Structures are given as structure tokens and as C-alpha cells.
Image (cartoon, helix red, strand yellow):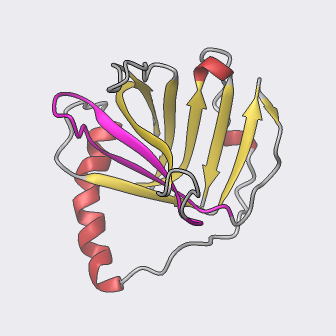
Amino acid sequence: MLNNISYTFGGIADSMQLCGQKIDKSILGKSRKMSKQFINALLEGNNNPPADKIIFDSSDHVRFQNGRDVSDHNFGCNRRLTIEKNINGGEGYTVTMYNLDGVHPLWGNNIQMSPKQMRIINVNDNIVELRGFGVDSLNASFADYGVLLLIENGLVSRAQLNMLDRNISIVYLK
């Protein structure tokens, strides 16, 4: 239990149907090779990763509030989580969430969660925990956000976004 938010990964059934985007097989090997070094940096708890990024696409998520499932599965809700070397330079990572289902009518882009500066605060076997630090250009703190990554066979298989100030967790599944 971390700030009243539990590691929810184990509570979600592993029998989800894989629903992803079409990938050009000619770049798949290269992408995996480039990402392997980045994945290793995450698993080692390295807050000074190589200049690279990983992309995790999800077609289902479950929302938890105060540790209770409040949404059930949201099949067909396509999201993309990107984790890259800190775009501002310095230590850590930049984490951004995109809505792959379309452009938002008010702000005209598909950003679901604006870029958040994070660093690794814990690695437990194959679960990597990142927590926000610093502030954005409007002086809003990133500390209320965290991400857990479940890494299996060298790839992110699940991701959990934690909004610590609201005691909300959203588990993203493939």
C-alpha cells in the first residue's frame, strides 16, 4: 500500500483480448532493440536513462477510487502512455498520456494527461514505480501523479496511473 493506493495489477484478470494497432513488422525488431536499453534503465532504477522512449498502447482500463473498482472494464477506450527521457533535460523521465480515440473538442489535441516530469522511486522485481517531481510552467506540482509499470518479457504489459491527491488509480491493459 502506497499512500492508500495499492498495487492493483494482481486484481485484474489476465485473459483480456489483445486489441492493438497495426505495426509495420520491418521496424518492430529495431524498435524492440532500442527500447530494450530503455527498459533495462527502468528496471535498474536509473533516473538518467538513454535518449529513447517506450510506448504502451492500451485498449481497456479500469478505474479505482479509494481502492474500489468504480468503472469496471472500459473496452475499446484506446490510450497511449509514453515514457521518455526527461524532455527538459536533467534527471528523470517525462510521462504523457494520449487519447487515441480522437481529438478533444475544446483543446484541439489528443493529450489525455499533459507531460509530467517523474523519477523512479522504487523497483520491486518487475514493477517500476515513478513519481512526479518539480512543477510545470504554471507552478502546478507534478508530485500528485505516479505511474506503476509491470514489465514482463522485456515489455510493459500493464500500466497504472495514480492520482495521489484524489486517491484514484487507473489500470491500463492491453
Q: Quadrant of the N terminus?
A: top right
In the displayed orientation, state which residue is furthest to the top. 3
Q: In the depicted view, which residue is nearer to us: 63 or 151?
A: 63
Quarter-of-image position of residue 159: top right
Residue 4, image x, y percentages: 68, 16
Q: Going 66% across and 33% down the picture, which residue do you hit? A: 169
User: For the magenta stretch, what is the residue range?
Assistant: 77-102
Relative side of 148 to 171, left or right: left
Is residue 122 something one can see in this rendering?
no
Q: Is residue 128 left or right of residue 7?
A: left
Q: Is residue 170 above or below residue 7?
A: below
Residue 86 falls in image quadrant: top left
Residue lying at 75% horizontally and 35% vertically, measured from the top left: 64
Q: Is residue 5 visible?
A: yes
On whether residue 92 falls in the magenta region, the answer is yes
The reply to whether the magenta stretch includes residue 121 is no
Residue 28 place in picture, x, y as percent: 32, 75
- Quarter of the image for the C terminus: give it: bottom right
Question: Residue 93 placed where, x, y %?
Answer: 30, 36
What residue sits 67% from the left and 61% below the top?
Answer: 77
Describe residue 9's horizontal placement relative to residue 15 as left or right.
left
